């Protein structure tokens, strides 16, 4: 009986490590996806700023105002 408990604990530890590795791979993949989206958004923002600088400036001021209002409430 003690042998089953000992080997079961070792197997449980191996399963936990494999689960942690799988979760780490999944998180890594999601971070890579997010990085791709951020790169695309950055390129879009740069293109907007080159083509329509006043619109980009207005958006920046508007976003800054909203963030400032949200932060002042806390």
Image (cartoon, grey):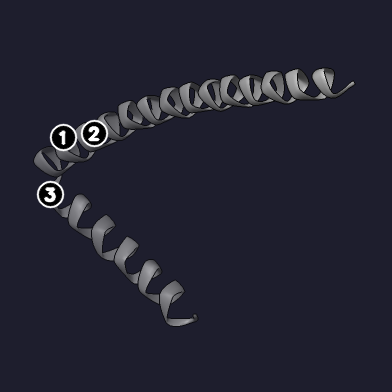
Q: Which residue is mark 1?
A: 47
Circle nearer the N terminus (1, 3) = 1
Q: Which residue is mark 3?
A: 53
The residue depicted at 48 percent of the width and 27 percent of the height is: 24
Quadrant of the rendered image containing residue 47: top left
Circle nearer the N terminus (2, 3) = 2
SS category of the residue bearing label 1: helix
The residue depicted at 30 percent of the width and 66 percent of the height is: 64
SS category of the residue bearing label 2: helix
Of tags 1 and 3, which is closer to the observer?
1
Q: Is residue 22 above or below residue 61?
A: above
> x, y (%) of residue 61?
25, 65
Q: Residues within 10 Å of mark 3 (few under 14, many from 20)?
A: few
Relative horizontal placement of residue 29, taking residue 47 as reference (left or right): right
Marking on residue 44: 2
Q: Nearer the viewer, residue 68 or 17?
A: 17
Q: Is label 2 in contact with label 3 (beta carbons under 8 Å)?
A: no
The residue depicted at 73 percent of the width and 26 percent of the height is: 9
- Most distant residue in the left direction: 50
- Most distant residue in the right direction: 1
> x, y (%) of residue 44?
24, 34
> x, y (%) of residue 5?
82, 24
Q: Is label 2 in contact with label 1 (beta carbons under 8 Å)?
A: yes
Q: Is residue 38 above or below residue 5?
A: below
> x, y (%) of residue 54?
15, 54
**CA distance separating discs 2 and 3:** 13 Å
**CA distance separating discs 1 and 3:** 9 Å
SS category of the residue bearing label 3: helix
Q: Nearer the viewer, residue 7 or 70?
A: 7
Q: Nearer the viewer, residue 52 or 70?
A: 70
Of tags 2 and 3, which is closer to the observer?
2
């Amino acid at each position: 009986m003690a042998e089953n408990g000992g080997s079961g604990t070792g197997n449980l530890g191996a399963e936990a490590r494999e689960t942690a590795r799988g979760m780490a791979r999944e998180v890594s993949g999601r971070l890579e996806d997010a990085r791709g989206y951020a790169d695309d958004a950055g390129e879009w923002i740069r293109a907007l700023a080159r083509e329509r600088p006043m619109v980009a400036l207005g958006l920046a001021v508007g976003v800054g105002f909203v963030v400032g209002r949200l932060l002042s409430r806390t």
